[in-house]
Amino acid sequence: MAAITSIDASQVGPFAAAITTLSADDTITFTPTKKQLLVLTNTTGGSLTATIDGSTGTTVNVAGVGSVDVSAGKAIAVPAGESRAVVLSTISAYCSGVVHITGAATLKAQLFDL
């Protein structure tokens, strides 16, 4: 399990943007006061699904819907040869506590602080 370090994207001009290859279980630090973009890239020949799962996520109340169970995490399918990106604040209910990315060994990941 590796901790994925965020990349400061508020820099002027070009900057280094490290790419991490995911294992079966990696962690990220969700910072609610920052706009964070997680980019997942699949360089394999088959689809992979990463699950974003905060350790303390259980249920949340959603206006007009009621109680929603977030305990299983948010699954993000990444087709072969493609990338998917998510602004973490849009899935913040899945990012409480220690945030794990599981089930997607070999995906490439970058976490940008915008």
Image (cartoon, helix red, strand yellow):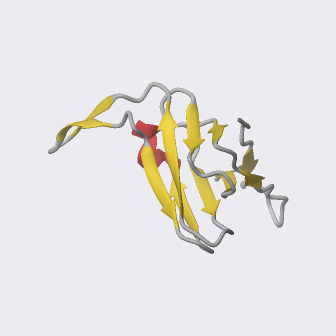
Q: Nearer the viewer, residue 45 or 11?
A: 45
Image coordinates of residue 33 in percent, x first then y, are: 55, 37
- Give above or below for 101 relative to 104: above
Give me the residue at 25% from left, 38% from top. 68
Q: Nearer the viewer, residue 9 or 45?
A: 45
Image coordinates of residue 25 in percent, x first then y, are: 63, 39
Give me the residue at 66% from left, 39% from top. 26
Image coordinates of residue 108 in percent, x first then y, are: 70, 58
| Residue 56, quarter of picture | top left
- Give above or below for 32 relative to 58: below
| Residue 28, quarter of picture | top right
Give me the residue at 49% from left, 33% from top. 54
Image coordinates of residue 111 in percent, x first then y, are: 66, 50
- Give above or below for 47 relative to 68: below
Quadrant for the N terminus, please.
top right
- Give above or below for 61 relative to 111: above
* In-image side of 16 versus 55 (left or right): right
